[in-house]
Image: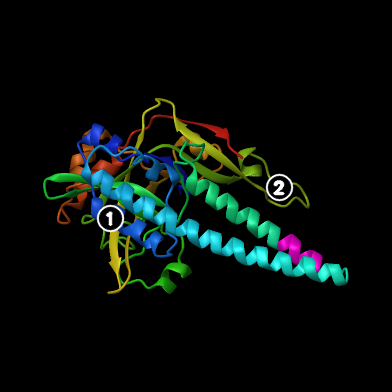
């Protein structure tokens, strides 16, 4: 599995590398959702890429980003005001009689104000920061797909809601941010050979058990502890990760979501105690991957089999 990754969050990298264009409609849709009070998890780096729009299309996306930010800042301000009122009431009560309850109200309210202010600071920040381009399941990522004769970059949630699923199905099976290669013809059969895309990343992260990483058995009475590892291709080249995606709708809500395809672990990844590795396809296979033929899945299988093996160096991330 790939539980986290640092992605290409600037769509212009796809333009330079593959000639892909921007899907304005999909970008404006997710920021419209945020403007209206929804909570799509969008990496900061995606919106920072539109700070200085180069054309009318990018300016349109930037306008929606700005509107969504201002709307959320307004909601944050309202929530802070509620907490400030609680503090004022509790402080007034303390003037009459000192109680543990009033002090606790003040403590909790101040913590909530600090949390809301941190959200506001992040929304208003204009300089990039570490992990701005990192995604986790449930976050949005950028995926390149083929529409007609053009490659198009769209924002998609990194956790696929499969055809026929309800929100309840998704909650019951939250692991669909990855698609196992050995289940492509079963669980993923309505997408494999039909809805293919590419997500580009520079690093990926996995959680492993510390005792597995240290290649030892648990000691008597020892409880398993997890640790986070960061993997980076030794070549320094980006990973071109094949994904399956789906445009889900129930007639009211719309959701573009995707899953990265994983395979048996590379040897150096297995040595760290992890049992899966995302597939990293060769650049020369990108066009064919984006133009699947459901009647020739063998060709898609061959692309996945002929993946890159750059050797993934690792370090302990946390």
For the residue pair 302 and 207, the one nearer the viewer reads as: 207
Question: Magenta residues, as a range?
Answer: 102-108
For the residue pair 185 and 145, the one nearer the viewer reads as: 145
For the C terminus, which image quadrant? top right
- 190 sits to left or right of 202: left
Q: Earlier in the sequence, mark 2 or mark 1?
A: 1
Q: Residues within 10 Å of mark 2 (few under 14, many from 20)?
A: few
Verify whether residue 104 appears in magenta.
Answer: yes
Q: Nearer the viewer, mark 2 or mark 1?
A: 1
- Which of the numbered marks, if any, corresponds to residue 26? 1
* Residue 101 at least partly seen: no
Count how many numbered circles sit on residues in the image: 2
Residue 41, percent from left and from top: 44, 55
Q: Secondary structure at mark 2?
A: loop
Q: Secondary structure at mark 1?
A: helix
Residue that appears at 18% across and 42% down: 288
Residue 22, percent from left and from top: 24, 45
Residue 29, percent from left and from top: 30, 59
Q: Residue furthest top?
A: 235
- Which residue is label 2 attached to? 218
Dominant secondary structure of the residues highlighted in magenta in the image: helix
Q: Residue furthest left?
A: 149
In the image, residue 45 sits, relative to residue 176, either above or below, namely above
- Which of the numbered marks, if any, corresponds to residue 219? none
Residue 86, percent from left and from top: 69, 68
Verify whether residue 112 appears in magenta.
Answer: no
In the image, residue 33 sits, relative to residue 145, either above or below, namely below
């Amino acid at each position: 599995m790939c539980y986290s990754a640092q992605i290409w969050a600037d769509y212009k990298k796809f333009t330079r590398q593959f000639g892909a264009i921007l899907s304005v409609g999909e970008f404006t849709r997710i920021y419209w959702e945020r403007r209206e009070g929804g909570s799509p998890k969008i990496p900061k780096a995606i919106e920072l890429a539109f700070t200085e729009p180069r054309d009318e299309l990018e300016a349109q996306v930037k306008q929606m980003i700005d509107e969504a930010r201002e709307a959320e800042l307004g909601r944050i301000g309202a929530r802070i005001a509620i907490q400030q009122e609680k503090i004022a009431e509790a402080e007034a009560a303390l003037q009459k009689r000192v109680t543990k309850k009033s002090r606790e109200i003040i403590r909790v309210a101040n913590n909530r104000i600090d949390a809301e202010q941190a959200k506001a600071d992040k929304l208003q920040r204009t300089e990039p920061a570490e992990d701005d381009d990192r995604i986790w399941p449930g976050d949005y990522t950028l995926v390149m797909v083929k529409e007609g004769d053009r490659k198009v970059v769209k924002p998609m949630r990194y956790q696929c809601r499969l055809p026929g699923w309800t929100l309840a199905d998704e909650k019951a099976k939250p692991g669909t941010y990855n698609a196992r290669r050995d289940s492509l013809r079963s669980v993923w059969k309505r997408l494999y050979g039909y809805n293919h895309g590419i997500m580009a990343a520079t690093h990926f992260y996995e959680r492993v058990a510390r005792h597995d990483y240290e290649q030892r058995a648990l000691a008597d009475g020892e409880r398993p502890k997890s640790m986070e590892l960061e993997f980076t291709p030794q070549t320094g080249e980006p990973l071109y990760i094949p994904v399956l995606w789906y445009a889900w709708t129930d007639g009211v809500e719309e959701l573009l979501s995707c899953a990265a395809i994983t395979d048996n672990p590379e040897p150096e990844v297995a040595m760290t105690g992890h049992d899966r590795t995302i597939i990293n396809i060769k650049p020369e296979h990108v066009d064919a991957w984006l133009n699947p033929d459901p009647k020739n899945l063998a060709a898609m299988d061959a692309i996945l089999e002929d993946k890159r093996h750059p050797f993934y160096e690792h370090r302990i991330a946390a």
